[in-house]
Structures are given as structure tokens and as C-alpha cells.
Amino acid sequence: MKAKGNTTTKVNIVTLGCSKNTVDSENLLTQLRGNGIMADHESSSDDANVVVINTCGFIDNAKQESIDTILRYVDAKEQGVIDKVYVSGCLVQRYREDLEREIPQVDAFFGTNELPAILKKFKANYKHELVGERLLTTPSHFAYLKISEGCDRPCSFCAIPVMRGKHVSRPYDELVKEAASLAARGTKELILIAQDLTYYGLDLYGKRNLADLMRRLSDVEGIDWIRLQYAYPSGFPMDVLDVIKERSNVCNYIDMPLQHASSNMLKLMRRGITKEKTEDVIQSIRDAVPDIAFRTTMIVGHPGETEKDFEELCDFVQKQRFDRLGVFTYSHEDQTHSFSMVDDVPQALKEERQATIMDIQEGISLQLNEKKVDKTFKVLFDRKESGYFIGRTEFDSPEVDNEVLVEAKEAYVRIGDFANVHIHDATEFDLFGTVIK
């Protein structure tokens, strides 16, 4: 097959991994278009002649997906379907030399903080005036707002500091400007993201200033929901709870990855907290905001996890009855402290433990959802699919949490709008309801 021979550069940006990568890709998209370069995000058409793959390098499955995607586009290049393949992001930051040696067909590699270098490949300049004018790849009614980069936490299993560097907060004014710009273009929900939200402000203002930032963002006209994701339990700033209670547009929701409940495992994981202190934090949050939705994630199969540790985790999950919970099997990652330990939990046992925790959580989720039947909730609708309008309550984040389904033949709602929905049925992870006129 012959090369296309396009006279005009057209770029397709492909994003893998977490919401933080999504924001990075959106910034690249904004800069390219701001320089007059045609660019799309995960375009369904095949007319792009340059592909930029924004990779994830967090755990084995994510790394393999990134490698497979790179090879797929390299193959397309060798067949003449596209002209150039650029690879950026966390995988490159972590394994640049290996990638350059093993996949030389890639035209250039860029780490996590090399946006200006990517732009130079297109003879484009980084336009500072576009900061805060980010183009979205999500539906326009919600957006991820990355308030900081990097992480200072020493968690034994995590390579994020290797890939993303030390914690760096973004200034208040820059974030408020971006939020106002998003709101002016129809964004109603801001999802605050970072490797650790609770560190916000330490480097710029000398103290944890997440609560102050939330108040400033809450004042932005047009923002109906503000949601917190990725809060660390150790040193959690309790004044954040005051803002959740004070401000009607701050969701009663928190995403706090706890990772484990056994003090033995928390010590091995270098989490800086014990089981007892973890329980105290959870109770303090629930006492302050009784109807808060609490989302967490756990890791099973970390080196040294005994059957006793796992049973303690199971008991903890049963007792705490989290609204939302996800479980990862431990991935033995080089360049982490845990890599010096023996990966002594067999993969089959890791997966068995993962399934056990999820079985427990499935039962809890069903019970909690059934309590919502015959109640009415404000719902933000994200999409229409398979004969349903599908949305979320303030207790649910996009893509990872429960959804509310309304039959399209019974009611019409506009995507991106709010509606009051009366719940008439529930399953483990979904609610079914009727729009209240």
C-alpha cells in the first residue's frame, strides 16, 4: 500500500490510562488547533497522517495495552496508512531507552512534561494564552480539572513519582480561570483530580489549601457540581468537609483510595497510616457529612499479604459498607520499593482474593441501592444508549460508578441536562427510574 502523501498534516491523538492523561491529551489538542494544525482525539475517520499515542505505564495490564497500541500504529505506518507515529506519556517517562531500542519505527518519544517538545515536531509554539482554554474530549457538560502534577508520597507499590515527578500545585488564579472558561462553554460538573488532592497548596502557599480552592471554584458561575477524586487518607485536611457542607454545588462524594485495611500491610505499603487511624478518618468524614458517598480502591496480593491480612481486609469491607469500591491485583513494578520484595502471592490467589472482595461489595452495593428505591434524585444525563437515557446522581463519578437509567420511550431528556428522577428499581450497580415532570 502506498503512503497517502497528504499535503496537510492531520493529527489523531490516542489516549490510554487515567483521567490525568485525558487532560494532557486535551491540552495537546488545544495547542495544536491553536497553532492552526488539524487535530482530533481518537478520530473514527482514517484520514490522519500523524498519530500521537499518550501512554499509560502504571501496571502490567496498562503497559501491555500501551505496547499493543504502539505496535498497531507502527504496523499501519509500515503499510503506508500513516506517515508518522509519536509516543508520549507515562510509559515513555519510565522506559524511554527500552522503547527506543525495541521499537525504532516510532518517529519520536516524549515524556510526561514534554508538551513543548511535541509541538516543535509540528513547527508549533506553546501558546500561553491558551492556558485555561482547554478543548474537551469528554462530553461538554463535565470536565476533569487537574489541580496539581506529580506526587510526594512514598507508597511502596507505586511508580507514579518516577513517571510524574514531585508534587507541583497549579496556582489558584490559573485554575479559577480555566473553570470559568469551561463553565462559559457549558461545563456543569468539575471533577478535581491529582495524584493526591490533599497535598494541594503545600508547595505554593505553605499549607494544605484544597478547601480554599474548592470555595473559589464553587463561586464560578455555571458550575453546578464539584467532585473530589483521589484524596489520600493520611493527613486528610478536615476543613474540606466544611466546604462540602457549606456549598450546595460541592458533591457529597469523596474518592479516597485506602489500598488495604491490615496495619501490617499498610506498613509494608508505606502508606503512613494504621488501620485504626484509617477507621478514625472514615468515621470523622461520615460524622461531618452523614450522607456522603465514599468511594475507595483496594490492592490484594501485595508481597507479604497473608491469609490473616486478607481476612482482615474482608472484615473491614463488610463493616465499612463503602458506597463504591474497586479492587486491583498487585502488579510487581520495577522502580518501586515493593519490587525489592518477593512477589510471593500467586497470581491465581490474587485473582481469587479480588473476586472475593468484589462479591462482598456487590452485595453491599445492592443493599445500598435498594434503599434508594421510591426516592427522588437530581440526575445529570451523560448519554443515550440501548433505549435508555443514562445519567448519574451527585454520588457517582463518570465511568467508574453507578448509573441511573431512564427508558427513552417513556421520557425525553437532553444530554448534559439535569432532571429529577424517581427510582423504581435497583440492581447491584444501576438504578432505574422515571423523570419527574
Image: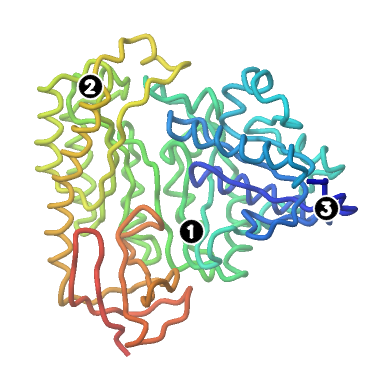
Identify the element where label 3 is drawn. Answer: loop
Crowdedness of circle 3 by 10 Å Cα count: few (<14), some, many (20+)?
A: some
Quick one: 288 or 430, which is closer to the camera? 430
Quick one: 131 or 43, which is closer to the camera? 43
Crowdedness of circle 1 by 10 Å Cα count: few (<14), some, many (20+)?
A: many
Crowdedness of circle 2 by 10 Å Cα count: few (<14), some, many (20+)?
A: many
Pointer 1 residue: 190
Q: Position of 170 compared to 437: left or right?
A: right
Identify the element where label 1 is drawn. Answer: strand
Asked if residue 187 is positioned above or below residue 175 in the image, the reply reads: below
**Residue positioned most to the front:** 1
Q: Quadrant of residue 44?
A: bottom right
Pointer 3 residue: 35
**Residue positioned most to the right:** 7
Amino acid on which the number 2 mark rests in the picture = Met
Q: Are marks 1 and 3 in contact (CB under 8 Å)?
A: no
Pointer 2 residue: 265
Label 2 or label 1, whichever lies nearer to me, is 2
